[in-house]
Amino acid sequence: MAPRVDPVRSDDVLQERADVVIIGGGIIGTSTALFLAQKGIRVVLCEKGHIAGEQSSRNWGWCRKMGRDPRELPLIIESLRLWQGMNELVEAETGFRQAGIMYLAETQTELSQLEAWLDHARQYQLDTRIISRGEAAELMPGLSGTWTGALYTASDGKAEPQRAAPAIAEAARRHGTAIVASCAVRGLETAAGRMAAVVTERGRVACDSVVLAGGAWSRLFCGNLGVELPQLKVLATVMRTEPLEGGPEISASGGLFGFRKRMDGGYTVATLGVRTIDLVPDHFRLFFDYLPAARLHWKKLRFRVGGRWIEEWRMPRRWGLDETSPFEAVRVLDPEPDGFVVDRARAATAQAFPVFRNAVVAESWGGMIDVMPDAIPVISPVESLPGFFIATGFSGHGFGIGPGAGKLVADMVAGDPTLVDPAPFRLSRFTDSSNPRPHPLAS
Ligand SMILES: Cc1cc2nc3c(=O)[nH]c(=O)nc-3n(C[C@H](O)[C@H](O)[C@H](O)COP(=O)(O)OP(=O)(O)OC[C@H]3O[C@@H](n4cnc5c(N)ncnc54)[C@H](O)[C@@H]3O)c2cc1C
């Protein structure tokens, strides 16, 4: 079941010309659109389904610095600054609140691993700290169980995924962006070695630059252009409870659960880090790229073989601009939630916080996360296609960093000084000698 998303009106007519076309209307595409439009740049955003239909409405809603790969820290710090002013900027409620996030540790080894991350926190003077079980229980009344302590960041936040990207899209529209839903981009046209146009199912838009913010579809899109993007998809399952009295205000995870209190008084609940991997041909094509990440998270991966193998095997990997593309066949990627994960998440949450025994599950849904081998995104120009930029592969933590990433992309496309150094996110890291690997705390 797909979560309900705030609707965003779509333009009826596709413009014939723009400065920049953005492919994908998730948190990355909409944020990029807003910051480009603020610079006075003419943007057309094409979305094959509806705004925030995929990952950007299905996530937990955590906006965290804590536990991030150090390469992402400068960008997430800027992103959280943007989130702080977001409601004002977009003149709407995105649900952003600085409510704090806590990682509870079950064992001393786990606590030491969390403590090791403080070295990164210190480098950026973050307020992240290790707290005792007693302090954790004071901050989150009702905590039960034998926790050894926790890593806690009071300045981390949360927002409402089903409202944020739509609100940002509406603001981009007020700044002049054209938003066109049910409009899949099939591919690109170049002229004299530069970007010239995108070709959509509804016609052609001439443009100087293109930003691919296509989430889990980005590898397929790039493949048709001959650009290798080593991206995979993993299924994450989430549930929403009805409003629950007496539960914690702070977002937390520990053992096998993770949750966030929603603005409607209910909770978004999931199983921390447990990912369902439906095996598809790409897992074999990219086997060696993902070996380090698989070794790191082995115990939390659930492998399955089923219908998705056939689906992806049958999906065309090459098509012409005058042919129906695979993006038109799946308007909204709405995978079935994994029932095993729902049961585990419910049980683990109720064990840590007995108040959750009374929680009524209103709905559950699946979300297809786009991952990269080193669990950090690609935010990068594509050298072989001048004028083509990629912003994808946010590896399960792109919601919090979304506004910052959007601003970074807008700066890159406009040729302005960039918000942060984009070098760690370059596409060429997979082919140069840097041998990218994931950070141990990255989910
Ligand atoms: C269950 C779950 C929990 C998560 N929890 C968190 C969290 O707590 N905190 C956090 O920071 N992150 C979290 N994430 C990750 C976060 O949701 C994503 O990293 C982020 O939403 C990615 O945004 P995006 O815009 O890149 O992709 P998406 O939101 O997936 O948007 C991509 C869009 O591109 C469109 N598209 C693709 N191809 C085309 C095409 N050819 N033409 C037109 N449109 C196209 C798609 O239809 C889609 O709407 C979670 C993700 C999931 C699934």
Image (cartoon, helix red, strand yellow):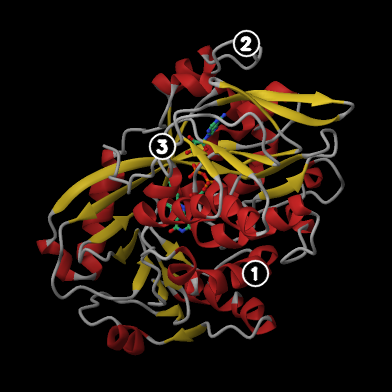
Q: Is label 1 in a helix, a strand or a loop?
A: helix
Q: Going 79% across and 39% down the picture, which residue do you hit?
A: 387
Residue with the most extreme left position? 358
Judge depth for marks 2 and 1 and give the one in front.
2
Where is 405 relative to 191, above or below?
A: below
| Label 2 sits on residue | 322
Where is 352 relative to 271, above or below?
A: below
Residues packed near mark 1 inside 10 Å, few (<14), some (14 to 19) or many (20 plus): many
Residue type of the residue flagged with mark 2: Asp
Q: Going 74% across and 31% down the picture, which residue do you hit?
A: 228
Beta carbon of the mark 2 residue lies under 8 A of ligand 1: no
Q: Is label 2 in a helix, a strand or a loop?
A: loop
Tell me which corner region of the image, top left, top right, bottom left or bottom right, holds residue 250.
Answer: bottom left
The disc, 2 or 3, on the residue closer to the chain's N-terminal end is 3
Q: Nearer the viewer, residue 225 or 311?
A: 225
- Give the total of numbered labels: 3
Where is 144 relative to 241, above or below?
A: below
Residue 190 in view of the camera: yes
Q: Which mark is residue 73?
A: 1
Residue 213 in view of the camera: no
Q: Going 62% across and 54% down the picture, which residue do you hit?
A: 37
Where is residue 401 shown, x and y percent of the image?
A: 56, 61
The CA distance from mark 2 to mark 3 is: 23 Å
Residues packed near mark 3 inside 10 Å, few (<14), some (14 to 19) or many (20 plus): many
Describe residue 335's horizontal placement relative to residue 108 as left or right.
Answer: left
